[in-house]
Image (spheres, rainbow, N blue to C red):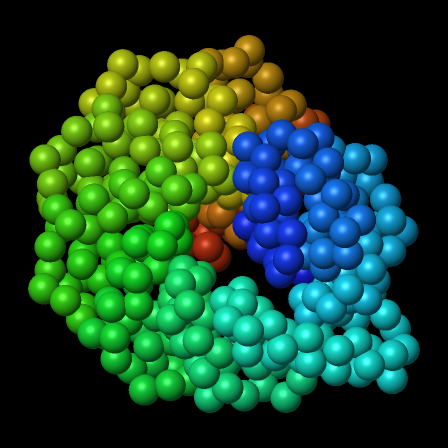
Amino acid sequence: MKKLVVILCMLGVLFGEGEKSLVERGAEAFEKRDYETAIRFWKQACDKKNGAGCRNLASAYFVGAGVEQDFKKARENLSKACDFGDGEGCEIFSNFIDDRKEVEQYINKAMKFSKKACDKKDARACFHLGVMYDEGRNIKKDISKAVEFYTQSCELGYAFGCNILGNLYDKGEEIAEDRAKAVELYQKACSGGSASGCRNLGVLYASGNGVKQDILKASELFDKSCNLGTDMACFYIANFYYEGEKIKQDKSRAVEFYQRACDKGNSSACVKVGYIYDTGDGIKQDKFKAVEFYTMACDDGVIIGCYNLGNKYMNGEGVKQDSFKAVELYKIACDIDYGMACNNLGVMYENGRGIKQDKYKAKTLFGKACDLKNELGCKNYARLNEAGY
Protein backbone atom coordinates (compact mmCIF):
# COMPACT_ATOMS: atom_id res chain seq x y z
CA MET A 1 0.00 0.00 0.00
CA LYS A 2 2.81 2.40 0.90
CA LYS A 3 4.43 1.88 -2.51
CA LEU A 4 1.11 2.43 -4.29
CA VAL A 5 0.59 5.75 -2.46
CA VAL A 6 4.11 6.81 -3.39
CA ILE A 7 3.50 5.96 -7.05
CA LEU A 8 0.24 7.91 -7.13
CA CYS A 9 2.03 10.92 -5.64
CA MET A 10 4.24 10.88 -8.71
CA LEU A 11 1.30 11.34 -11.06
CA GLY A 12 0.41 14.98 -10.40
CA VAL A 13 1.41 17.94 -12.54
CA LEU A 14 5.11 17.61 -11.88
CA PHE A 15 7.52 20.43 -12.60
CA GLY A 16 11.29 20.43 -12.36
CA GLU A 17 14.28 22.71 -12.72
CA GLY A 18 15.91 23.46 -16.07
CA GLU A 19 13.93 21.87 -18.91
CA LYS A 20 10.61 22.93 -17.46
CA SER A 21 8.89 23.29 -20.82
CA LEU A 22 9.46 19.62 -21.65
CA VAL A 23 8.31 18.44 -18.23
CA GLU A 24 5.27 20.70 -18.25
CA ARG A 25 4.27 19.72 -21.77
CA GLY A 26 4.60 16.08 -20.84
CA ALA A 27 2.45 16.62 -17.73
CA GLU A 28 -0.23 18.39 -19.76
CA ALA A 29 -0.27 15.55 -22.30
CA PHE A 30 -0.46 12.99 -19.49
CA GLU A 31 -3.48 14.73 -17.96
CA LYS A 32 -5.18 14.56 -21.37
CA ARG A 33 -4.29 10.84 -21.49
CA ASP A 34 -2.03 11.41 -24.46
CA TYR A 35 0.53 9.11 -22.90
CA GLU A 36 2.67 8.65 -26.02
CA THR A 37 3.33 12.39 -26.23
CA ALA A 38 3.95 12.61 -22.48
CA ILE A 39 6.53 9.84 -22.65
CA ARG A 40 8.30 11.51 -25.56
CA PHE A 41 8.65 14.83 -23.72
CA TRP A 42 9.75 13.21 -20.47
CA LYS A 43 12.34 11.06 -22.22
CA GLN A 44 13.78 14.17 -23.84
CA ALA A 45 13.89 15.94 -20.48
CA CYS A 46 15.47 12.93 -18.78
CA ASP A 47 18.07 12.62 -21.55
CA LYS A 48 18.99 16.23 -20.79
CA LYS A 49 19.55 15.23 -17.14
CA ASN A 50 16.35 16.76 -15.83
CA GLY A 51 15.44 14.86 -12.68
CA ALA A 52 11.71 15.64 -12.82
CA GLY A 53 11.57 14.27 -16.37
CA CYS A 54 13.14 10.98 -15.20
CA ARG A 55 10.81 10.85 -12.19
CA ASN A 56 7.72 11.33 -14.34
CA LEU A 57 8.98 8.72 -16.78
CA ALA A 58 9.32 6.34 -13.83
CA SER A 59 5.68 6.98 -12.91
CA ALA A 60 4.61 5.97 -16.43
CA TYR A 61 6.57 2.71 -16.19
CA PHE A 62 5.08 1.98 -12.77
CA VAL A 63 1.48 2.17 -13.98
CA GLY A 64 2.04 1.13 -17.60
CA ALA A 65 0.76 4.40 -19.08
CA GLY A 66 2.01 4.84 -22.67
CA VAL A 67 4.62 2.14 -22.13
CA GLU A 68 4.56 -1.48 -21.06
CA GLN A 69 4.55 -1.75 -17.27
CA ASP A 70 8.13 -2.33 -16.19
CA PHE A 71 9.12 -1.95 -12.53
CA LYS A 72 12.82 -2.39 -13.31
CA LYS A 73 12.80 0.55 -15.73
CA ALA A 74 10.72 2.55 -13.25
CA ARG A 75 13.35 2.08 -10.56
CA GLU A 76 16.17 2.82 -13.02
CA ASN A 77 14.55 6.14 -13.91
CA LEU A 78 13.99 7.00 -10.26
CA SER A 79 17.66 6.33 -9.62
CA LYS A 80 18.55 8.65 -12.52
CA ALA A 81 16.22 11.30 -11.14
CA CYS A 82 18.06 11.18 -7.84
CA ASP A 83 21.48 11.23 -9.55
CA PHE A 84 20.36 14.37 -11.39
CA GLY A 85 19.53 16.12 -8.11
CA ASP A 86 15.79 15.52 -7.84
CA GLY A 87 14.91 15.31 -4.15
CA GLU A 88 11.53 13.68 -4.72
CA GLY A 89 13.14 11.06 -6.92
CA CYS A 90 15.57 10.20 -4.11
CA GLU A 91 12.81 9.99 -1.50
CA ILE A 92 10.51 7.89 -3.66
CA PHE A 93 13.38 5.57 -4.63
CA SER A 94 14.16 5.00 -0.93
CA ASN A 95 10.77 3.28 -0.56
CA PHE A 96 11.95 0.46 -2.80
CA ILE A 97 15.13 -0.25 -0.84
CA ASP A 98 15.29 -2.78 1.99
CA ASP A 99 18.70 -1.93 3.44
CA ARG A 100 18.19 0.66 6.19
CA LYS A 101 21.59 2.31 5.78
CA GLU A 102 21.04 2.71 2.05
CA VAL A 103 17.58 4.16 2.72
CA GLU A 104 19.14 6.77 5.03
CA GLN A 105 21.61 7.72 2.31
CA TYR A 106 18.81 8.39 -0.16
CA ILE A 107 16.75 10.30 2.41
CA ASN A 108 19.76 12.50 3.16
CA LYS A 109 20.09 13.16 -0.57
CA ALA A 110 16.37 13.88 -0.81
CA MET A 111 16.59 16.46 1.99
CA LYS A 112 19.72 18.05 0.56
CA PHE A 113 18.42 18.36 -3.00
CA SER A 114 14.93 19.49 -1.97
CA LYS A 115 16.28 22.14 0.41
CA LYS A 116 18.62 23.40 -2.28
CA ALA A 117 15.74 23.63 -4.77
CA CYS A 118 13.45 25.23 -2.18
CA ASP A 119 16.10 27.85 -1.41
CA LYS A 120 16.04 28.63 -5.13
CA LYS A 121 12.29 29.23 -4.82
CA ASP A 122 11.14 25.92 -6.32
CA ALA A 123 7.64 25.81 -4.79
CA ARG A 124 7.11 22.09 -5.33
CA ALA A 125 10.41 21.27 -3.61
CA CYS A 126 9.30 23.31 -0.59
CA PHE A 127 5.98 21.44 -0.63
CA HIS A 128 7.81 18.10 -0.80
CA LEU A 129 9.82 18.99 2.29
CA GLY A 130 6.59 19.97 4.05
CA VAL A 131 5.06 16.59 3.25
CA MET A 132 8.13 14.72 4.50
CA TYR A 133 8.07 16.56 7.86
CA ASP A 134 4.27 16.42 8.09
CA GLU A 135 4.04 12.66 7.54
CA GLY A 136 7.37 11.72 9.09
CA ARG A 137 8.40 9.94 5.92
CA ASN A 138 11.69 8.30 6.94
CA ILE A 139 12.50 11.37 9.06
CA LYS A 140 11.28 12.55 12.46
CA LYS A 141 7.85 14.15 12.19
CA ASP A 142 8.04 17.89 12.82
CA ILE A 143 4.79 19.80 12.27
CA SER A 144 6.40 23.22 12.81
CA LYS A 145 8.88 22.56 10.00
CA ALA A 146 6.05 21.18 7.86
CA VAL A 147 4.11 24.43 8.33
CA GLU A 148 7.25 26.42 7.51
CA PHE A 149 7.76 24.64 4.18
CA TYR A 150 4.06 24.53 3.27
CA THR A 151 3.96 28.28 3.88
CA GLN A 152 6.94 28.82 1.59
CA SER A 153 5.38 26.71 -1.15
CA CYS A 154 2.07 28.58 -0.82
CA GLU A 155 3.74 31.99 -0.90
CA LEU A 156 5.54 30.86 -4.06
CA GLY A 157 2.16 30.13 -5.65
CA TYR A 158 1.89 26.35 -5.19
CA ALA A 159 -1.85 25.77 -4.75
CA PHE A 160 -1.48 22.33 -3.16
CA GLY A 161 0.72 23.82 -0.44
CA CYS A 162 -1.96 26.43 0.32
CA ASN A 163 -4.63 23.73 0.54
CA ILE A 164 -2.68 21.45 2.87
CA LEU A 165 -1.77 24.41 5.09
CA GLY A 166 -5.44 25.43 5.10
CA ASN A 167 -6.34 21.92 6.23
CA LEU A 168 -4.00 22.17 9.20
CA TYR A 169 -5.53 25.48 10.33
CA ASP A 170 -9.05 24.20 9.60
CA LYS A 171 -8.76 21.00 11.66
CA GLY A 172 -6.73 22.53 14.48
CA GLU A 173 -5.43 19.12 15.54
CA GLU A 174 -1.69 19.72 15.25
CA ILE A 175 -1.58 23.50 15.20
CA ALA A 176 -3.91 26.12 16.69
CA GLU A 177 -7.25 26.21 14.90
CA ASP A 178 -7.76 29.34 12.81
CA ARG A 179 -10.76 29.08 10.49
CA ALA A 180 -10.32 32.62 9.14
CA LYS A 181 -6.76 31.69 8.14
CA ALA A 182 -8.06 28.46 6.61
CA VAL A 183 -10.56 30.42 4.51
CA GLU A 184 -7.77 32.70 3.26
CA LEU A 185 -5.56 29.73 2.32
CA TYR A 186 -8.34 27.72 0.69
CA GLN A 187 -9.25 30.80 -1.36
CA LYS A 188 -5.65 31.06 -2.54
CA ALA A 189 -5.56 27.34 -3.31
CA CYS A 190 -8.83 27.48 -5.22
CA SER A 191 -7.70 30.51 -7.24
CA GLY A 192 -4.55 28.55 -8.09
CA GLY A 193 -6.55 25.64 -9.53
CA SER A 194 -6.68 23.27 -6.55
CA ALA A 195 -9.91 21.26 -6.76
CA SER A 196 -9.61 20.28 -3.10
CA GLY A 197 -9.08 23.92 -2.13
CA CYS A 198 -12.35 24.91 -3.83
CA ARG A 199 -14.19 22.01 -2.19
CA ASN A 200 -12.83 22.76 1.28
CA LEU A 201 -13.70 26.44 0.92
CA GLY A 202 -17.18 25.42 -0.18
CA VAL A 203 -17.60 23.32 2.96
CA LEU A 204 -16.76 26.33 5.13
CA TYR A 205 -19.21 28.59 3.28
CA ALA A 206 -21.90 25.89 3.53
CA SER A 207 -21.40 25.53 7.31
CA GLY A 208 -20.59 29.15 8.11
CA ASN A 209 -17.33 28.20 9.83
CA GLY A 210 -14.73 30.95 9.64
CA VAL A 211 -16.87 32.89 7.20
CA LYS A 212 -20.46 34.11 6.92
CA GLN A 213 -22.67 31.27 5.70
CA ASP A 214 -23.41 31.61 1.98
CA ILE A 215 -25.05 28.60 0.32
CA LEU A 216 -24.97 30.14 -3.14
CA LYS A 217 -21.22 30.75 -2.80
CA ALA A 218 -20.75 27.20 -1.52
CA SER A 219 -22.64 25.86 -4.55
CA GLU A 220 -20.46 27.86 -6.91
CA LEU A 221 -17.31 26.53 -5.24
CA PHE A 222 -18.54 22.92 -5.32
CA ASP A 223 -19.41 23.36 -8.99
CA LYS A 224 -15.90 24.66 -9.72
CA SER A 225 -14.30 21.87 -7.71
CA CYS A 226 -16.45 19.29 -9.46
CA ASN A 227 -15.34 20.65 -12.84
CA LEU A 228 -11.74 20.41 -11.65
CA GLY A 229 -12.25 16.73 -10.87
CA THR A 230 -13.24 16.32 -7.20
CA ASP A 231 -15.91 13.63 -6.79
CA MET A 232 -17.06 14.78 -3.34
CA ALA A 233 -17.74 18.29 -4.62
CA CYS A 234 -19.99 16.80 -7.31
CA PHE A 235 -21.69 14.75 -4.60
CA TYR A 236 -22.22 17.76 -2.31
CA ILE A 237 -23.85 19.91 -4.98
CA ALA A 238 -25.96 16.94 -6.08
CA ASN A 239 -27.25 16.70 -2.51
CA PHE A 240 -28.12 20.41 -2.59
CA TYR A 241 -30.21 19.96 -5.75
CA TYR A 242 -31.79 16.71 -4.56
CA GLU A 243 -32.81 17.89 -1.10
CA GLY A 244 -33.90 21.37 -2.20
CA GLU A 245 -33.39 22.77 1.29
CA LYS A 246 -30.49 25.10 0.56
CA ILE A 247 -31.04 25.86 -3.13
CA LYS A 248 -34.00 25.38 -5.47
CA GLN A 249 -34.76 21.68 -5.82
CA ASP A 250 -33.89 20.21 -9.23
CA LYS A 251 -33.69 16.41 -9.27
CA SER A 252 -32.61 16.28 -12.93
CA ARG A 253 -29.59 18.42 -12.02
CA ALA A 254 -29.05 16.25 -8.95
CA VAL A 255 -28.87 13.15 -11.14
CA GLU A 256 -26.41 14.91 -13.45
CA PHE A 257 -24.04 15.68 -10.57
CA TYR A 258 -24.50 12.28 -8.90
CA GLN A 259 -23.55 10.64 -12.19
CA ARG A 260 -20.49 12.86 -12.48
CA ALA A 261 -19.48 11.92 -8.95
CA CYS A 262 -20.06 8.26 -9.74
CA ASP A 263 -17.96 8.51 -12.91
CA LYS A 264 -15.14 9.96 -10.78
CA GLY A 265 -15.24 6.93 -8.48
CA ASN A 266 -17.69 7.98 -5.76
CA SER A 267 -19.57 4.72 -5.16
CA SER A 268 -22.06 6.33 -2.75
CA ALA A 269 -23.14 8.54 -5.64
CA CYS A 270 -23.55 5.43 -7.81
CA VAL A 271 -25.98 3.99 -5.24
CA LYS A 272 -27.86 7.28 -5.02
CA VAL A 273 -28.36 7.69 -8.75
CA GLY A 274 -29.28 4.01 -9.01
CA TYR A 275 -31.97 4.54 -6.36
CA ILE A 276 -33.35 7.59 -8.17
CA TYR A 277 -33.66 5.65 -11.42
CA ASP A 278 -35.04 2.65 -9.54
CA THR A 279 -37.85 4.62 -7.91
CA GLY A 280 -38.39 7.26 -10.59
CA ASP A 281 -37.91 9.92 -7.94
CA GLY A 282 -38.29 13.17 -9.90
CA ILE A 283 -37.12 11.66 -13.17
CA LYS A 284 -38.34 8.97 -15.56
CA GLN A 285 -38.06 5.53 -13.93
CA ASP A 286 -35.48 3.28 -15.56
CA LYS A 287 -34.81 -0.11 -13.92
CA PHE A 288 -32.07 -0.92 -16.44
CA LYS A 289 -30.10 2.17 -15.47
CA ALA A 290 -30.73 1.36 -11.81
CA VAL A 291 -29.10 -2.05 -12.33
CA GLU A 292 -26.17 -0.39 -14.11
CA PHE A 293 -25.42 1.96 -11.21
CA TYR A 294 -26.09 -0.61 -8.48
CA THR A 295 -23.61 -2.90 -10.24
CA MET A 296 -20.95 -0.19 -10.25
CA ALA A 297 -21.49 0.43 -6.54
CA CYS A 298 -21.43 -3.26 -5.67
CA ASP A 299 -18.23 -3.78 -7.69
CA ASP A 300 -16.69 -1.04 -5.53
CA GLY A 301 -17.70 -2.90 -2.35
CA VAL A 302 -20.71 -0.81 -1.29
CA ILE A 303 -22.98 -3.13 0.70
CA ILE A 304 -26.29 -1.48 -0.10
CA GLY A 305 -25.38 -1.51 -3.78
CA CYS A 306 -25.01 -5.31 -3.63
CA TYR A 307 -28.23 -5.67 -1.64
CA ASN A 308 -30.23 -3.50 -4.06
CA LEU A 309 -28.76 -5.37 -7.01
CA GLY A 310 -29.74 -8.64 -5.35
CA ASN A 311 -33.33 -7.39 -5.21
CA LYS A 312 -33.24 -6.58 -8.92
CA TYR A 313 -32.07 -10.11 -9.79
CA MET A 314 -34.58 -11.62 -7.38
CA ASN A 315 -37.50 -9.76 -8.93
CA GLY A 316 -36.25 -9.65 -12.51
CA GLU A 317 -36.34 -5.85 -12.65
CA GLY A 318 -34.02 -4.30 -15.22
CA VAL A 319 -32.28 -7.64 -15.59
CA LYS A 320 -33.21 -11.25 -16.30
CA GLN A 321 -34.58 -12.95 -13.17
CA ASP A 322 -31.84 -15.03 -11.55
CA SER A 323 -32.34 -16.43 -8.04
CA PHE A 324 -28.82 -17.87 -7.96
CA LYS A 325 -27.31 -14.44 -8.62
CA ALA A 326 -29.62 -12.91 -6.01
CA VAL A 327 -28.35 -15.42 -3.41
CA GLU A 328 -24.76 -14.58 -4.32
CA LEU A 329 -25.38 -10.85 -3.87
CA TYR A 330 -27.36 -11.20 -0.65
CA LYS A 331 -24.52 -13.32 0.74
CA ILE A 332 -21.96 -10.62 -0.09
CA ALA A 333 -24.01 -8.00 1.75
CA CYS A 334 -24.89 -10.29 4.67
CA ASP A 335 -21.23 -11.23 5.17
CA ILE A 336 -20.56 -7.51 5.71
CA ASP A 337 -23.38 -7.40 8.29
CA TYR A 338 -26.20 -5.79 6.31
CA GLY A 339 -29.23 -7.01 8.25
CA MET A 340 -31.85 -6.89 5.49
CA ALA A 341 -29.58 -8.89 3.19
CA CYS A 342 -29.27 -11.59 5.88
CA ASN A 343 -33.05 -11.68 6.19
CA ASN A 344 -33.54 -11.99 2.42
CA LEU A 345 -30.88 -14.68 2.23
CA GLY A 346 -32.73 -16.52 4.99
CA VAL A 347 -35.91 -16.35 2.91
CA MET A 348 -34.03 -17.88 -0.04
CA TYR A 349 -32.84 -20.79 2.15
CA GLU A 350 -36.29 -21.24 3.68
CA ASN A 351 -37.98 -21.48 0.29
CA GLY A 352 -35.16 -23.20 -1.59
CA ARG A 353 -34.84 -20.41 -4.16
CA GLY A 354 -31.46 -20.20 -5.84
CA ILE A 355 -30.03 -22.59 -3.25
CA LYS A 356 -30.84 -25.95 -1.63
CA GLN A 357 -33.66 -25.59 0.91
CA ASP A 358 -32.40 -25.52 4.50
CA LYS A 359 -34.74 -24.11 7.15
CA TYR A 360 -32.18 -24.49 9.92
CA LYS A 361 -29.73 -22.35 7.94
CA ALA A 362 -32.60 -19.93 7.27
CA LYS A 363 -33.24 -19.64 11.01
CA THR A 364 -29.53 -18.91 11.64
CA LEU A 365 -29.62 -16.15 9.03
CA PHE A 366 -32.82 -14.69 10.48
CA GLY A 367 -31.09 -14.71 13.86
CA LYS A 368 -28.13 -12.82 12.47
CA ALA A 369 -30.47 -10.29 10.84
CA CYS A 370 -32.24 -9.86 14.20
CA ASP A 371 -28.90 -9.34 15.97
CA LEU A 372 -28.26 -6.60 13.41
CA LYS A 373 -31.49 -4.87 14.52
CA ASN A 374 -33.55 -5.99 11.54
CA GLU A 375 -37.17 -6.28 12.69
CA LEU A 376 -38.28 -8.60 9.91
CA GLY A 377 -35.39 -10.91 10.71
CA CYS A 378 -36.56 -11.08 14.34
CA LYS A 379 -40.12 -11.94 13.28
CA ASN A 380 -38.95 -14.63 10.87
CA TYR A 381 -36.63 -16.12 13.50
CA ALA A 382 -39.48 -16.30 16.01
CA ARG A 383 -41.75 -17.91 13.40
CA LEU A 384 -39.27 -20.68 12.54
CA ASN A 385 -38.42 -21.16 16.21
CA GLU A 386 -42.10 -21.73 17.05
CA ALA A 387 -42.27 -24.18 14.15
CA GLY A 388 -39.57 -26.29 15.81
CA TYR A 389 -36.53 -25.39 13.73
Percent position of residue 297, x then y? 50, 36
The quadrant of the picture occupied by the N terminus is bottom right
- Please state if 195 lies on the left or on the right of 342 as rendered: left
User: Percent position (x, y) of residue 82?
Assistant: 78, 66
- List the single residue furthest toward the top: 320
| Image label count | 0
Q: Is residue 360 left or right of residue 318?
A: right
Q: Residue at x 87, y 84 (%)?
A: 101
**Viewer-side residue, 372 vs 30:** 30
**Which residue is at the front of the view, 284 or 6?**
6
Residue 198, placed above or below residue 35: below
**77 over 36 or under it: above or below:** below
Going by the image, does 245 lie left or right of 177?
left
Question: Can residue 262 be seen in this snapshot?
Answer: yes
Q: Residue at x 47, y 47 (%)?
A: 339
* x then y, percent, for residue 55: 72, 55
Query: What residue is drawn where x is 35% and y is 34%?
Result: 258
